[in-house]
Image (spheres, rainbow, N blue to C red):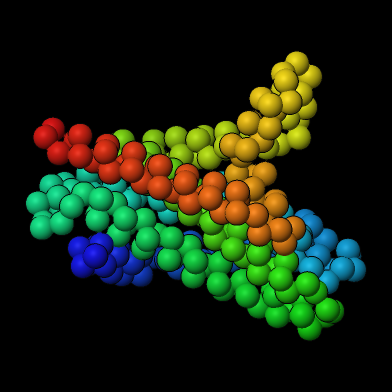
Amino acid sequence: MQGTLAVFRREFAGYFATPVAAVFLVVFLLLCGVLTFNQAGFYERGQADLMPFFTWHPWLYLFLVPALAMRLWSEERRQGTIELLLTLPLATWQATLGKFLAAWAFAGIALGLTLPYWATVAWLGNPDHGVIAASYLGSLLLAGGYLAIGSFVSALTKNQVIAFVLSVLACFLLVLAGYPTVLDFFGAWAPDAIVEAVRSLSFLTHFETLSRGVVDARGIVFFVSTMVCFLIAGTATVELQKGR
């Protein structure tokens, strides 16, 4: 795993070598605060929980995480450094995994900076800490799923804007699959098995289960499988582009 760790350190340090880290963290924390306290009525609800905070994560990540992932391979191709990276003594999957883990770790830092919300709720009341911990786990897995999709799309093009737009679209479709309106649409004419299949493909469905404190193995398997599948697809895409 030395090759993976080398790529991880290179990518992770790269976030803090530019204003990318500061801008992302400031925007993420600012939007979290505005959406939680202003839009969701955190104090007005009179309940000691973080439901207003986590409710927005699928939609907040929908734009912020693809913005983080769009540069993973597109930037390498635009600058012409991908050839140098791929000539190093490491496998393509190691480079893909190292880049993904660096972005995921950075997203984890951003999420970790919201822990004062947890402390605030604990100070104001007596929340169910198990539910909050499960919600944080779900949020981290959700970010990982988005990042894996973004990494795959970034490997398809050297244009970061195109990578961003396609990643947002792909993630949006996987969130929308669990939206009540979509499920009602399928439920009006399709058998229950098809409705459940559509529901099972949704990030929203599995994240909401975890955010309610239900650590369901199916949700964890879904997110991990999504990450693995898209990382394999991204690795295959980079391999196909080696000879071009």
Which quadrant of the figure contains the C terminus?
A: top left
In the figure, 13 relative to 192: above or below? below
Q: Nearer the viewer, residue 28 or 117?
A: 117
Quarter residue 74 falls in: top left
Q: Nearer the viewer, residue 127 or 221?
A: 221
Q: Nearer the viewer, residue 9 or 191?
A: 191
Expressed as whole percent of the image width and height from the top left, the position of residue 227 reads: 44, 48
Does residue 24 appear in this view?
Answer: yes
Quarter residue 135 falls in: bottom right
Which residue is at the far bottom? 123
Q: Nearer the viewer, residue 119 or 5?
A: 5
In the figure, 198 relative to 130: above or below? above
Q: In this view, does 104 lie to the left or right of 57?
A: left
Residue lying at 76% horizontally and 23% vertically, measured from the top left = 187
Which quadrant of the figure contains the N terminus?
A: bottom left
Residue lying at 26% horizontally and 38% vertically, measured from the top left = 236
Q: Is residue 38 left or right of residue 243?
A: right
Quarter residue 27 falls in: bottom right
Residue lying at 36% horizontally and 56% vertically, measured from the top left = 100
Residue lying at 9% horizontally and 51% vertically, measured from the top left = 87
Expressed as whole percent of the image width and height from the top left, the position of residue 154 reads: 34, 42
Does residue 160 appear in this view?
Answer: no
Expressed as whole percent of the image width and height from the top left, the position of residue 210 reads: 67, 56
* Count of numbered circles in the view: 0
Expressed as whole percent of the image width and height from the top left, the position of residue 110 reads: 52, 67
In the figure, 78 relative to 18: above or below? above
Q: In this view, does 42 lie to the left or right of 219?
A: right
